[in-house]
Image (cartoon, rainbow, N blue to C red):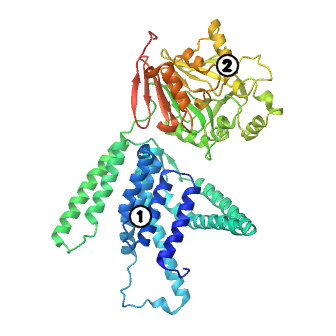
Amino acid sequence: MLRRRARTAALATLFVIVLYALIVEHNAPILRAATMSILLCVAQLMRRPFCGLNWLAFSALCVLTYNPLELFRAGFQLSFVQVLALLTIVPHLYRFVIRRHPDAEIPADADSYAGLVARRLGRWLVGLAIVCISAWIISLPLVMFHFGRFAPWGALQSIIISPLVMVTIVLGFLTLIGLAIAPPLGQFFGLLLRGSTQLLLRFVEHLSQLPGTLIEMQRPPAVFVICAYACLLLLAWSWWPCDGERPARRHRRTRRIAGTFCALVAACTSACGLLLARVGSPDAVAVYVLSVGSGAATLVADPGSHAALFDVGTIHNFDAGQTAVQAARALGVHKLDLLAVSHANFDHYSGAATVLAGLPTQRLVTNPYLVRAADDEPAVRRFLQMLPECAPAFTVWQAGQHVPFGNVSLEVLWPPPDLGQCWEPNDRSLVIRLSAYGRSVMIPGDIEDAALRSLLERHADGQVDLRADVLIAPHHGAVVRGDTAAFYAAVRPQVVVNSSGRERPKLTAMLDALAGADVRLLSTHDAGAISIYLTTDGGIEIQTPFAAWTVQACDGRE
């Protein structure tokens, strides 16, 4: 557009792409897009041909070399499947719909600018529709598998909001450039960017409230995904234009009949897999430690349709409450007996308002000191302001209480009712142990040195038994000075689950020194959401998106 040579344009584009990749979050789609775009620019500089499929494969290798676990995550799979469709299916569909004029034929609209604009706009709209519909269809099996939901109008809504998304992206770049060149110009574009972003968010919110926009469903099994993509590949193969010499009509007809028949078989198999998907929770008490980054959200469900959520928050730029609501619905949980907020830290309550608005909740539970501190602590005031008007009244739990909860026994280990005002909010966190079928799981919130020391003293005096088979690591796996190692030794867990958005090498080293191979450490940072099942025979089954195993009884404990 600036009438520069192709290699000059490639250098400028390369600079912008690298700058963009450095600014934004380093997830699989961003790394894939940046790698492919850089290869495109390098090919232009070296006068090499366009090889989109090779670049896509190379970018997949780069992402998996950076983090092999990305292979099992939704972002990686959706990104590469959709781009594969854009590189293969979309061009053929576009050429089929837009019958290009022969080179010798002059378009009739060449006499007027209005005709030229109408022609270009029409083709742009056709291309946008083909892209959105193809991406929606190709990603549908993975979306159903990973998120347990179906958006019937997803393609149409993507077509509607795409122009506004493009405007927002362009304004974002203009804001960055303006701030670097002339701050007043950048501030002007920043105001436009803010308005565009707010309009986009409101538009998306209105679209999400239309009837039938989102249909919740049970997650289908993996066989559904495999067979669905086999169906699409067979259909594409049977009707794909043949390169080289034109095959005989009989051969083309045979290939189409065979491909269509195999696709129908794959479609029937995938439909059967969808109908036979497991419905409901297993015959066990389930504890789900959700993956919310640096935050906490633990969902507990028993076979008797009782469910509770212990903390729901994160410090990252997403709504942990929405994650918890989606997880609950996918697991067949449509109401909560209680929502417990251990203490007034944002990474433990940021999603509470969303959960209370999205799931009917009977009780809102907290420690005895949270509401009292509303006048003195801004974090508490913020928490109370976030709660919707429909929120239930607070129920206060304190040390020594035993709370019946379906097949689960809830025991409150901390805090006692007589703590002074000098105690930090973290050390006033609720510490809860739930027990079922002779097994137990401890959820200790963010307790630190003072609370750990007091609990150890009570444990030594026989006032409380700290032992538990599974321990959710206190304070997201932080190893504070003093009695952290002694606390883990007193609990004697067989499994430690760390809800954190980063590695905790000190925790790993401490557990290796204490128990070595006798303790298994899991982190949501590496494994994603972690499912813990306390089974009726006294066993513990652990499942992650990557593996599953059973914890056997040890130390003579039942």
- The residue singled out by tag 2 in the image is 414
- Is 456 on the left or on the right of 331, as rendered? right
Q: Is residue 35 visible?
A: yes
Looking at the picture, which amino acid does disc 1 mark? Answer: Leu
- Position of 66 relative to 453 (above/below): below
Image check: 472 left or right of 98?
right
Query: 300 or 370, which lies in front?
Result: 370
Residue lying farthest to the right in this orientation: 375
Reply above or below: 32 against 88. above
Coordinates of residue 310 in the picture (x, y in percent): 61, 29
Q: Position of residue 55 (x, y in %)?
A: 39, 61
Quadrant assignment, res 295 = top right
Question: Looking at the image, can residue 301 be seen?
Answer: no
- Residue name at image x 63 percent, y 63 percent: 172
* Amino acid tagged 2: Trp
In the picture shown, does residue 410 fall above or below 212? above
Q: Which residue is mark 1?
A: 86
Q: Is residue 281 left or right of residue 477?
A: left
Q: Which mark is residue 19?
A: none
Q: CA distance from mark 1 to mark 2?
A: 55 Å
**Rendering quarter of residue 402:** top right
- 253 w.r.t. 225: above or below: below
In the depicted view, which residue is nearer to us: 362 or 285? 285
Image x and y of residue 84, in percent: 39, 60
**Label 1 crowd bin: few (<14), some (14–19), many (20+), radius 10 Å:** some
Residue occupying image coordinates x 67% and y 13%:
400
